[in-house]
Structures are given as C-alpha cells and as structure tokens.
Amino acid sequence: MRLASVGVGFAFLSACLSTRPQVTSPAPVSSPPTVEISDTPDTSAAPIYVVDGDVVPPSALEAINPKDVASVTVLKGPNAVTAYGVRARDGVIVITLVPPDRRAERCRPPTPATPAVASIFVADLVRTEPYTEQLRVDRQRSTWPMVRLFLKVLHGWKRNPLQSEGWHEGDTLIFGITPDQDPKLPAGVRALAYLQPTFSEVTRQARDTAITTVEDTGFLELFPCYSVRRVEEAQSDLRLLGHPDWQVLRH
C-alpha cells in the first residue's frame, strides 16, 4: 500500500521559479551516511528543505502558498554541507517566505471549475488517525506530527483515483496530511473531496543531449487547502457537477 502523501518537491518549486532548480549529488565519500524516512516507500537520496531557517519534511510544503514565497535558493555540494552539515550532502532547498503581514490572499477552496482539479469524489469519512513522520539522517532524527485520512469512495467525476494501484485499500483512499489540512470531521460524515495531480521531472538522453521534462505521475493528492468538505456545505458544487462520471460497484 502506498500512502498518498504531501510530497511536492520540484512541482512546488516550479510554481515559485521561472526555471526549475537542478539538485545533483556530490561525489561519494567513504562510509556514506544513510537516510531513512518512515511512512514513505521511497528512501532514495533527496535534498533537505529549509523554510525560514527550519528544516521541514517535503510534506510541509503543501501548506505553503507559492505566492507567499519570497525566494528559493538551491545549495549543492560543499556549500550545502558547510551550511547544514552532512545531512545536506544531497543538496538543500532554502525557502524564504514573505512576512505574514505582507502575504497573498489565503488559499481558496477548489470548485468544479478550478483548472488544477484532476478528480472530485463523494466519500464517507471512515476515520482519521494521528501519526508521526520521522526523518533520520545519520544519528540525527526529526519528527513531524501528521494525520492519516481514510475515505471510502462512493462515486465521482473526472479521473477515478481508485484506478491508481497501490495507494488505497479496496475502495478506501488513504492520505497523509499535515494537521493544518485536517478537515476535523467526525467519522461517518459524507464529504466531497478534491484531488490534484502530482508531477515529477523525467530526464531522457537524446544522443549527446539530456532532455528534462515535467510529467504527470498519475498519482493524485488532496488539494492543499479546503480539500474535504461536508456534502451539506457543498451543494452548489454538486449541482454544477450533475450526474457522476463513475461509481464504485460493490458486490
């Protein structure tokens, strides 16, 4: 099972920069340090993220409005290690935010007309449960509070997220979200949920030229804010959506 997480990486940075930063690994050294990330399937090398001086997990970027980003700096190689230690051996992405009193308007709820929406569905909230995401780099360990959201899908519009293998249990989608994203709804509530696509950089070699493109991974995640609402509070959206494009068949 793959846990739908709040990973953003280069997709988030591309919204803040006109050119996407490239992070390259430094030359290998003897007895290389190890990186272990729990609650995610991918333990490959990756840069660390620093927001206003604090190291944060990639999932924390979901709560950031790209319009609130003042600057993004990419440190690589010795410069990264000098500034942040051995845990930064695969690079550092330093994000500086605009002061709170000068930030852009807060994130608005998605609607059926929002261009970035890839999937909309009605589901019953099975339960939510807190957990801790851990990041260990050599002997240093950091933890962040997270919340798992279990949604039993009934029907929906646009893309059917249940067709993506490995990140759901039967007809129940599972998302890892930050406490700020938690809709704080009781179990059993019927809700309308909005998903957006995720993107990754793909590099292909064409003779002597490496071509890097950003492609849809096919993996969907919850919208960064107001992504799950009671159906009673989303009647106008449901009227616009009309008859569902697909339904979950149960035997």
Image (cartoon, rainbow, N blue to C red):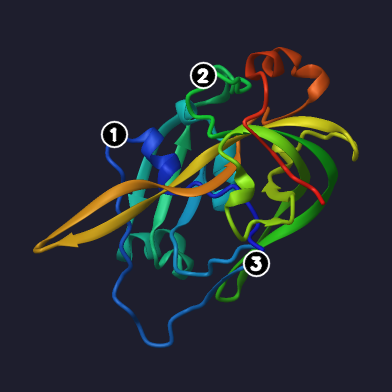
Q: Which of the labelled discs sits on residue 175, or is there none?
A: none
* Front-most of residues 212 and 134: 212
Mark 3: which amino acid?
A: Ser
Tell me the element at label 2: loop
Vertical arrangement, residue 166 with respect to residue 129, above or below: below
Front position among marks 2 and 1: 1
**Viewed as shown, does residue 186 lie left or right of 148?**
right
Q: Percent x, y for residue 192?
A: 73, 29
First reached walking from the N terminus: tag 2 or tag 1: 1
Mark 1: which amino acid?
A: Ser
Query: What's the CA distance linking mark 2 and mark 1?
Result: 19 Å
Asked whether the beta carbons under mark 2 and mark 1 sit within 8 Å of each other, the answer is no
Tell me the element at label 1: loop
Query: What's the CA distance linking mark 3 and mark 1?
Result: 32 Å
Mark 2: which amino acid?
A: Ala
Q: Which residue is mark 3?
A: 38
Query: What's the CA distance linking mark 2 and mark 3?
Result: 33 Å
Q: Which residue is mark 1?
A: 18
Asked whether the beta carbons under mark 3 and mark 1 sit within 8 Å of each other, the answer is no
Vertical arrangement, residue 140 with respect to residue 179, above or below: below
* Front-most of residues 60 and 233: 233
Tell me the element at label 3: loop
Asked whether the beta carbons under mark 2 and mark 3 sit within 8 Å of each other, the answer is no
Label 2: few (<14), some or many (≥20) within 10 Å?
Answer: few
Give the residue displayed 52% in from the left and 26% down from the top.
Answer: 99
Give the residue displayed 78% in from the left and 30% down from the top.
Answer: 191
**Viewed as shown, does residue 120 lie left or right of 34?**
right
First reached walking from the N terminus: tag 2 or tag 3: 3
Q: Which residue is mark 2?
A: 104
Front position among marks 2 and 3: 3
